[in-house]
Amino acid sequence: MTNLFKNHYAIVCTLLLGISMLMSCSKDDDTPAPKVYPEENPLTLYLSNSGFNQKATNFINSGTYEFGYSFKPKVKGKINAVTFRIPDNATNVKVTIWDAATKAPLRSVVIPNAVANTELRQAIEPLEISTDTEYLVSYNGRSWYKRQKTDGSIAAYPVEAGNILITGFRWGATTSADQKYPVTVSKDYYGGDLSIVFQQVD
């Protein structure tokens, strides 16, 4: 009887140890994967909430400028791409993301071929951005859509656009070969279309 009891005891202990190990492994396997947030393009909300979606005028080959909007993310995230659309064909359009405080370029990408009135997306090496920094995205070009309110009035900045806060529109005269941070602020129109593809991260 003693040997039989010992055998049963050993079997029960082995089973309990196995169950414990299985439960431990199961807990490890149940660790939730990091949440993947949807990508956001703030341009549509920016134009709508500012009122600049009410009237559009096409400018083609009208001098060379650097155009763009400044912004701050409301949450931690990254920029995965830029989007671009103008009323004319263009080649080798340079798009730059800047640190607004230092005016230093953080990332530049060249769009090889833009087709008139067709929005395209150009991927970039993901750029992490933080809530305590203001940024600006701009492009160097000769053609753009000028978007305004019907009555020509100014927009009230900042403009809410999802997880992005648009803080202003800037432009500056330049040349196609010159990369220069745009410093002139205009509140009564937006010139583009150019935007970012933003994705929140934990």
Image: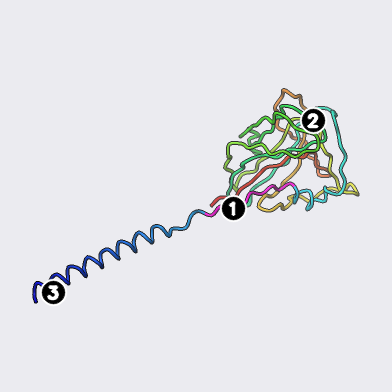
Dot 1: element = loop
- 100 or 27, nearer to the observer: 27
Instruction: Estimate the x, y position of residue 137 in percent, counting from the top left.
Output: 69, 38
Which portion, as a residue range, is magenta?
A: 35-43
Q: Kindly report which numbered mark, 2 or 3, lies closer to the viewer in this rendering.
A: 3
Q: Earlier in the sequence, mark 1 or mark 2?
A: 1
- The residue positioned 38% from the left and 61% from the top of the image is 27
Q: Which mark is residue 5?
A: 3
Question: Which residue is the extreme one toward the top?
Answer: 177
Quadrant for the N terminus in the image:
bottom left
- The residue positioned 73% from the left and 38% from the top of the image is 84
> To which residue does mark 1 refer?
37
Is residue 128 rendered to the left or right of residue 115? left
- The residue positioned 69% from the left and 33% from the top of the image is 95
Is residue 42 rendered to the left or right of residue 128? right
Q: Which mark is residue 89?
A: 2
- The residue positioned 30% from the left and 65% from the top of the image is 19
How much space separates mark 1 and mark 2, taking CA atoms? Answer: 34 Å
How much space separates mark 2 and mark 3, taking CA atoms? Answer: 88 Å
Instruction: Estimate the x, y position of residue 159 in percent, counting from the top left.
Output: 74, 51
Q: Earlier in the sequence, mark 2 or mark 3?
A: 3
